[in-house]
C-alpha cells in the first residue's frame, strides 16, 4: 500500500521529536536534582557555621529562582511531549482512514490524497526517502515541536 512508507516516515519524524523532548526533560530533571543538592549543601554549611546567614539567604534565593525556571521548563516540555504523542495518534488515524479510502480507489483518488497531504515526496528508487507536508499538515505535524 502506498501509505505505509508515508506512515513510517511520519511516525519516525514524530518519534525523533519525542526522543529530543525526552532528552530535554532528562536535562531539566538533572538540573533540578543538582539545584536541590546545592541547596542542601548550603544548609549543611550554614549549620556547621561555615556560611553566614545573609549569604545563605542570597544563595537560597538564587537557587529558588533557578528551580522555578527549571520546573517551569520541565512542565512545558511535558505538555509538549503530550502533544507529540497526541499528534502521533492523530497522524496514524488520519493515514489509516486515507488508506482505507484509497484501497479500492482509482489512481486519481490516490493522487488526490497524496496532493492533499504532501507538497513533495522524494523517492529513492521506488521508496519514499523524504517528504514535505502540504498545509495544514506541516503545521499539525511539525511546527509546534521545533
Image: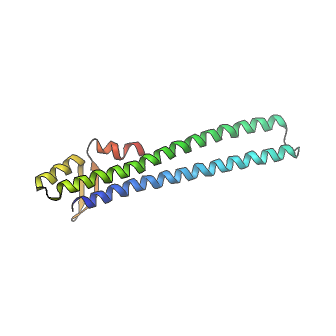
Q: Name the residue at 29% across, 45% down.
A: 137
Judging depth in this view, the residue of 98 and 137 nearest the camera is 98
Q: Position of residue 142 (x, y in %)?
A: 36, 46
Q: Is residue 146 visible?
A: no
Residue 42 lies in what quarter of the image? top right
Q: Where is residue 61 in the image (x, y as percent from the top left)?
A: 72, 36
The residue at the far right in this view is 49
Q: Name the residue at 70% across, 47% down.
A: 36
Judging depth in this view, the residue of 33 and 56 nearest the camera is 33
Q: Position of residue 64 (x, y in %)?
A: 68, 38
Determine whether, in the image, residue 106 is placed left or right of residue 115: left
Determine whether, in the image, residue 33 is placed left or right of residue 110: right
Tell me: residue 70, above or below residue 127.
above
Q: How many labels does the image show?
A: 0
Q: In which quarter of the image is the C terminus?
A: top left
Q: Position of residue 1 (x, y in %)?
A: 21, 62
Determine whether, in the image, residue 50 is placed left or right of residue 30: right
Amino acid at each position: 500500500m502506498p501509505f505505509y512508507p508515508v506512515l513510517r516516515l511520519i511516525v519516525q519524524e514524530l518519534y525523533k521529536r519525542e526522543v529530543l523532548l525526552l532528552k530535554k526533560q532528562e536535562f531539566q530533571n538533572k538540573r533540578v536534582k543538582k539545584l536541590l543538592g546545592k541547596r542542601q549543601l548550603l544548609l549543611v554549611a550554614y549549620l556547621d557555621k561555615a556560611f553566614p546567614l545573609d549569604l545563605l539567604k542570597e544563595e537560597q534565593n538564587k537557587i529558588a529562582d533557578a528551580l522555578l525556571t527549571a520546573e517551569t521548563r520541565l512542565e512545558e516540555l511535558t505538555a509538549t511531549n503530550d502533544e507529540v504523542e497526541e499528534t502521533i495518534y492523530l497522524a496514524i488515524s488520519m493515514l489509516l482512514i486515507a488508506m482505507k479510502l484509497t484501497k479500492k480507489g482509482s489512481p486519481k483518488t490516490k493522487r488526490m490524497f497524496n496532493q492533499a497531504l504532501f507538497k513533495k515526496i522524494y523517492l529513492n528508487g521506488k521508496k519514499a526517502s523524504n517528504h514535505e507536508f502540504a498545509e495544514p499538515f506541516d503545521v499539525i505535524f511539525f511546527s509546534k515541536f521545533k
